Amino acid sequence: MSIIGALVAYKGKPAKVVASTTHKYEVSFSDGSSQKVREKDFRYIHPEFSNVSDQCSNADISILNDLHEESLSLQEITEWIFDDFTSQNAWCAYLMSEDGLYFYWSKDALMLRPIEQVKIIQTQRNEKALAAASLERCIVNLNNNVFDNDDIVWINEIEQVALNQSKHSKAMSALSIENTPEKAHELLVKLKYWSELMNPYPQRHKVYLDEEVKVKSKEFSRKDLTHLTSIAIDNSDSSDADDAISIDGDKLWIHIADVASYVDIDSELDIFAQKRASNLYLPDQILHMLPPELSSFCSLGSSKISDAISIGLRLDSSEISDIEIHLSEIKVTNMSYEYADKVINENDVLSKLNDIASSHKSFRNDNGSIKLNLPNVDVKVKGQKVFISPQEDSNSRDLVAEMMVIAGRTIAQFAVENDISMPYLTQEAGSFSEDVVDNIQNLTIAKAFEASRGFKRSKVTVKPSIHSGLGLSAYTRVTSPMRRYLDLLVQQQLVRFLSNQPTLDDNAVKDRIKVINSLLPKVNKAIRQSIEHYKCLYLKQNNSWEGEGVIVEVNGEKALINIPSLAMMTQIKFKSKINIEDKVKLKVISINLFERSVNFKPL
């Protein structure tokens, strides 16, 4: 059959077949242009071409409901719904087939849709049209920096992008705003849907929020150590005391909150804690590794008698001996660092403990330990304001820190002697300049920064080895089972050993180390970025801030500067000669809250 002169559809446009060759047909269009195309690239519509219009009416769609055939030709459908098979009617039927509501092409036949399917598609199209109209109204509002209740569905989409839980927002795309968490965050603050105080970083890094889980404890026989004066020293606003210290003659006791009695290996709570890896101490909130209810149960001093795991030892400067470890009961006196600092030389127990800590610290110093006193600050949100305060040197903080090191050293020694698999924290010897080594206990900020570059990365491994930074031959962290999963794992292993239950082997401990190592980067990133956010906000709230920086590194005209009062680093280009250790007065010239960046300039 010759189709010369026929009406065809090519790329959705009407065309007339005007000539043919062996393999192609020439078709012409209403604008006078023509093109040679293959037969499979166009669809035959009607044997007679006429100028057709996309304006269609008078179609009787209801008649399709009475048809029982599954498929029809274009001519048959045209005759059913328009009565006459004219070029115009055939073109209108073709347009309806392309729309696909009532029928659609399957090769060269048109398939009729069931009535119910047509209704579903029509409903979906109506909803889509309403959504498009809603989005259009929302965009008008957002361009004027306002929104109303009808816009919330689109605002929620933007919020999902800001929290890194979606990669796309229709509203942001319509506004030609890049679909990034930072840009979404900025838009939400601009709209005042989010306050500048809003902290998106835990959710952005998919850190689990607090949940309540039912808590059950196991009953163990316990050693009565309630006769000891057991002191738990912590921040004044802390409610999670997980360690306490005592002395009994020449025997030192370090007590750790007994969390493992509630959180057994592979229990529901253990999996819960593994997923979180660590507490997050943020300026605006604390996100707990374990359910907050459990923390209150386990916290030392939260009741008259506290359950603990108590580590007893004798310490002769370099040697630890006579180790005993018990599931215990203790009476705890809670004390703030501020109060402990006032009474550390008057309180008999604290004074003796302080002497032991100082002696052990001297032993570690002789063994090559390095502690960098780089400036650090506490960042807190109170009400609508951000506060930054320096972390001052504190005798009681040093005392507690040293006791925790002793506990970690003791448990490592006990685990090696009793062949208990543990996650040991190790660190190879670093590489430091002679100047740093000679002044290791009294480093300036610049020298401490230089030394920080010389440390080897610490590792967690099942093989006990040196921790050069601490000056110890073996060490494991054990004193924060409520706050760090690997500390909890150490405690679980101890409780199992003490109660004659099978402990995990090296491979099982390695598997848990891998899980925690995979989670800690996002936890640490959420903490770091939260602090950076609130430091930026602090500077916005205190826009006349001026302060001093110390040059810690020089590279040509550029200097890296540490700002002690903010515990921040910044890089500035200088025209004049500069030297390491120089002090520079600084002021803020710009802040980007959403990129968490601050630009400073010298005064």
Image (cartoon, helix red, strand yellow):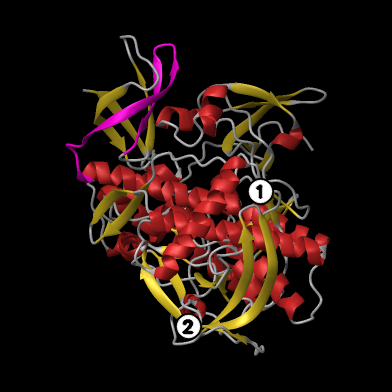
320 lies left or right of 370: right
344 lies left or right of 218: left
Residue 233, position as x, y percentages in the image? 42, 67
The magenta-colored residue range is 541-564
In the image, is residue 562 above or below residue 206? above
Examine the structure image and report whether residue 548 is included in the region drawn in magenta. yes
Q: CA distance from mark 1 to mark 2?
A: 31 Å
Examine the structure image and report whether residue 401 is included in the region drawn in magenta. no
Counting the numbered discs, the total is 2
For the stretch drawn in magenta, the main secondary structure is: strand
Residue 149, position as x, y percentages in the image? 28, 64
Mark 1 element type:
loop
Q: What amino acid is found at the position of numbered circle 1 in the picture?
A: Leu
Q: Nearer the viewer, residue 19 or 373?
A: 373
- When asked about the image quadrant of residue 134, the answer is bottom left
- Residue indicated by mark 1: 472
Q: What amino acid is found at the position of numbered circle 2 in the picture?
A: Lys
Residue at image point 35% right, 14% down: 578
Question: Does the residue at mark 1 contact the one at mark 2 (Cβ under 8 Å)?
Answer: no
- Which numbered circle lies on residue 331? 2
In the image, is residue 44 above or below residue 135? above
Tell me the quadrant of the picture where the C terminus can be found.
Answer: top left
- When asked about the image quadrant of residue 572, the answer is top left
Q: Nearer the viewer, residue 364 or 541?
A: 364
Residue at image point 65% right, 90% down: 219
